Each structure stands twice: as structure tokens, then as C-alpha cells.
Amino acid sequence: MRRQGLVGVHRRTGRKSLTSQDRMATAPPDLVGRDFTAHAPNTKWSADITYVPTDQGWVYLAVVMDLFSRRIVGWAMAPHMRADLVCDALAMAVTARRPGPGLIHHSDKGSQYTSLAFGRRCEEAGIAPSTGRTGSCYDNAVTESFFASLETELIDRTRFATRADAEREVFSYIEGFYNPWRRHSANGQLSPAEYERRHTEVAQDRLAALSQAA
């Protein structure tokens, strides 16, 4: 690499923790217990917040991941970390996926996720909120892994002049690369979109076989 003038990209060090717990809020219990497997789409979602540096200052990114396929099903960006940010990401996920009853939404105990506004959004959608321990990346390891990929594959390679530039590039990364193309060992080296597509095909084939047998 040295002879070719190539330099490896390393994940940024000392990433600032964005978890600020509201000691007055009642946090939901941990319904996941570090079991990040899911037998079908829209049974377990995982969520977290990170930041993207720009010349205008930080812009914050909230994501919602479906643990079945590792697909980012909802996300939102804003120059603030108010509860609106995570509510917007959840709203996108609910609109896109239309989950049935029994879905678990897992996050840390950050004040955004234990806020009354976010709790109401979960209740309205029939979602069971779940929280891990404060400051423990292992309790939300899969979403942390996504942020590591985002940082090494986009953020650490790019200087964003404006927050709008960062939002456009993050959109392209998630919707144009990560969901449709990025392979995952947990998916048998399939992308999230392809993994879900094959799951749907298998389910449809089984239903067709049962109909014929009946």
C-alpha cells in the first residue's frame, strides 16, 4: 500500500457519546437482552444517534434498523438532538414498513428515547419500547456496527461544507448503497434488500405450496 501511495481508512477515535439520560424519566425494560436475531422482518428494530461533522457544525443522524436483515428502515437528520429527531426516524420506519403488533424497538436510555413524545409515538404504533444500559455499546452492538461502517466508508473519507451536503451524502449512502448493495455476514453475504427479497420469495412459495396441497 505504501508503494502505491495508498492509506487505510480508520474509524475516528474518541467518538463523543451522545447518550444523555433523563434521571427523572422511567426507562422501558430491556426486551432484547443482546439477542440481536429476528425470525422475520418487523419483529425487532434497533435505534441510535450519531453525529456528522461539517464546516457549519455537527448534524445529527438518528437511524432505525430492522434486526432481521440489518436494513435501515427509518432515519432522520437535524442540527439538534431533541426528541423530534428520533420521532421523525421512527415515523419514517412506521410509514415505510407498516409493522404489525408485537414489534420491539430497542435503543439506549438516552433522554430522546425515554421522552413522553417518543413513548406516545410507540404506543400509537403498537410498538413495545426497549432500552439497554446507559453507555454500554454492547447492548446496541448492531446499530453501533452500522455507524462504524458509515464512518469508515463515508464520513472519514469526506469533508462536508454544509449540513445539507452531509444530508445528501448520507441519503445516498443509506438508500443507494447500504440497503441495496452492502453485504453482511449475518445475511449470508447478501445485502439487506436482497435478503428480505429472498425471504419474501420463500414465504410466497410456501403459501403457494400449501394452497395447492389444500
Image (spheres, rainbow, N blue to C red):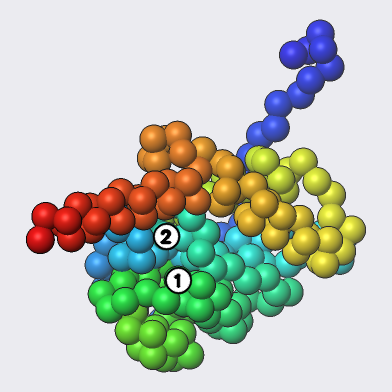
For residue 75, above or below residue 159:
below
Residue 158 image offset from top left, x and y in percent? 80, 46
179 left or right of 173 in image: left
Task: Give the quadrant of the N terminus.
Answer: top right
Q: Secondary structure at mark 1?
A: helix
Q: Amino acid at mark 2?
A: Asp
Residue 167 or 7: which is nearer the viewer? 167
Residue 69 image offset from top left, x and y in percent? 41, 51
Res 185 quadrant in image: top left
Query: Which dot marks residue 97?
Result: 1
Residue 196 or 82: which is nearer the viewer? 196
Res 6 quadrant in image: top right
Which is nearer the N-term, disc 1 or disc 2? 2
For residue 157, above or below residue 110:
above
C-alpha separation, residue under disc 1 versus residue under disc 2: 10 Å
For residue 179, above or below residue 73:
above
Question: In the image, what residue occupies the spot 24% across and 56% down?
Answer: 208
Q: Is residue 138 visible?
A: no
Q: Residues within 10 Å of mark 1 (few under 14, many from 20)?
A: some
Q: Residues within 10 Å of mark 2 (few under 14, many from 20)?
A: many
Identify the residue position indicated by label 2 in the image.
Answer: 66
Residue 75 or 60: which is nearer the viewer? 75
* Mark 1 touches mark 2? (CB < 8 Å): yes
Question: In the image, what residue occupies the spot 32% across and 84% down?
Answer: 126
For residue 80, above or below residue 106:
below
